[in-house]
Amino acid sequence: MTFNPGDVVTVDFPGVSGVKRRPAVVLSSTTYHATRPDVIVGLITTQTTSLGTTDYVLQDWATAGLRVASVFRSFIVTLPPSANLVLIGHLSERDWKDVRACVKVALAELDDSPDTLS
């Protein structure tokens, strides 16, 4: 199955205490998917305490296929097809915009500036 950026899926997600079935949002692009079998995803959690600047409280969680209020967390992994990704929904435009903003803050700038090469 092909996934699109902003799709909400359930996956066998690796964590500190083993693998757990949980929701995630697809972050990888359609260009990436054209040549790679794996998918880059970010964690979705119900833990709403201790939020950081790279976390985002989803506003339209129910329309995204989630059962309870949830938070995007910039815990990003690349998963193989064996992670058993199952599509459950898609983020609203406003949630997708803010999730992308969190990812941008979480990752180092990807330009060729000499200041970023240390």
Image (spheres, helix red, strand yellow):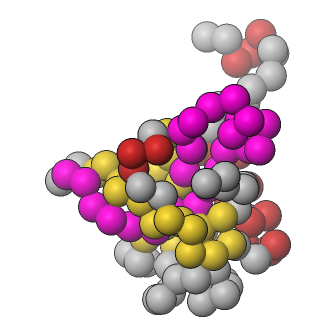
Q: Is residue 108 visible?
A: yes
Q: Residue furthest front?
A: 1
Q: Residue at x 81, y 72 (%)?
A: 93
Q: Could you tell me which quadrant the C terminus lies in?
A: top right
Q: Position of residue 59 (x, y in %)?
A: 66, 84
Q: Residue at x 69, y 39 (%)?
A: 33
57 to 3, vertically: above or below: below
Q: Is residue 20 above or below residue 60?
A: above
Residue 34 belongs to magenta span? yes
Q: Nearer the viewer, residue 76 or 111?
A: 76
Expressed as whole percent of the image width and height from the top left, the position of residue 107 reads 62, 38
Q: Quadrant of residue 6?
A: bottom right
User: Is 20 placed left or right of 23 in the picture?
Assistant: left
Residue at (61, 54) in percent of width and height: 1
Residue 112 vs residue 15: left or right?
A: right
Identify which residue is drawn at 66% across, 87% down: 63
Location of residue 117 by image quarter: top right
Q: Nearer the viewer, residue 28 or 48?
A: 28
Q: Is residue 14 magenta?
A: no
Q: Which residues are magenta?
A: 18-41
What percent of the width, then of the height, locates residue 15? 28, 51
